[in-house]
Amino acid sequence: MKKIFTKAFLGVCALGTSVVAIAQDAAAPVVEESFHQALKIKFIEGSADFMSTIAIALILGLAFALERIIYLNLADTNADKLLKGIEAALDKGDVEAAKAIARDTRGPIASIAYQGLMRIDQGIDIVEKSIVSYGGVQGGLLEKNLSWITLFIAMSPSLGFLGTVVGMVMAFDKIEQVGDISPTVVAGGMKVALITTIGGLIAALILQVFYNYLLSKLESILNKMEDASITLLDIVIKYDVKYKK
């Protein structure tokens, strides 16, 4: 009987020790890598040469995108307020006041209106040609540098695929040197191949989002420019009928 109690006691002690050990392991702090550290490690593992070129393409693309975002947001003005001010001035026959309103307002619509008002004494046909011609100029300025963003969108995955090819070549070189196809031999080259592709695709996706936003903003401004040009011609015709005939 005594032996049975002794064995039971030792079993309970062993069980208690195991529970304590498990509790200590659970309570021990789990060391996790931060996102920044993990990103840095993958950057290095993906071959710094290729990952650097992808990072440069992403940074330059974002720089052009930021410049266009600022420019287009500044170009997007209140066209209705501008045209109402010009119409009110022309209703009074004050062309100089209408020019001043257009000159003091920023944006392509105001610039187009100013060019049309500068030729208001030369007839409706000249005003219309001026608005159309200068509208094309302003449209070109709005689209400036967008081609660079598309270039970096195309370059980023291409650089990633180039890293993929180089990584595969490195893997085959290792196989040729060692004469073995074990995972440890080809792991380095395959890692370069996969990480560079992922990096290039991520950079292209980021730039594509900004590019699509810029396209939608550009289309909105161009539509406003067309509507404002038609309205401006109507205002000029109304002025011409009222004060010249």
Image (cartoon, helix red, strand yellow):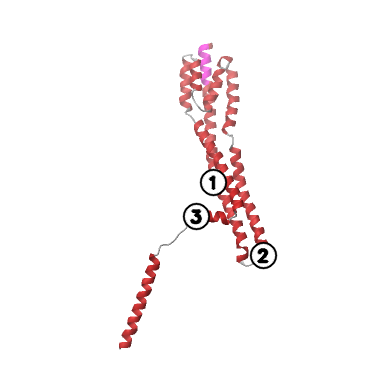
Q: Earlier in the sequence, mark 2 or mark 3?
A: 3
How many marks can you see? 3
Q: Earlier in the sequence, mark 1 or mark 3?
A: 3
Mark 3 lies on residue = 37
Front of the two marks 1 and 3 = 3
Magenta-colored stretch includes residue 235 = yes
Q: Nearer the viewer, residue 208 or 239?
A: 208
Amino acid residing under circle 3 = Gln
Amino acid residing under circle 2 = Ile
Q: Residue furthest top?
A: 245
Cα separation, mark 2 vs mark 3, equals 31 Å
Q: Are marks 2 and 3 in contact (CB under 8 Å)?
A: no
Cα separation, mark 1 vs mark 2, equals 36 Å
Q: Please state the extent of the stretch shown in magenta in the rendering.
A: 234-243
Q: Is residue 41 above or below residue 109?
A: below
Please tell me how crowded label 2 is: few (under 14), some (14-19), or many (20+) other residues with Cα within 10 Å.
some
Cα separation, mark 1 vs mark 3, equals 21 Å
* Quadrant of residue 170 within the rendered picture: bottom right
Residue at x 54%, y 36% (from the top left corner)? 67
Q: Label 1, secondary structure: give it.
A: helix
Instruction: Identify the main secondary structure in magenta.
Output: helix
Q: Residue furthest bottom?
A: 1
In the image, which disc is placed on residue 175? Answer: 2
Q: Where is residue 241 drawn, in percent x and y? A: 52, 14
Mark 1 lies on residue = 206
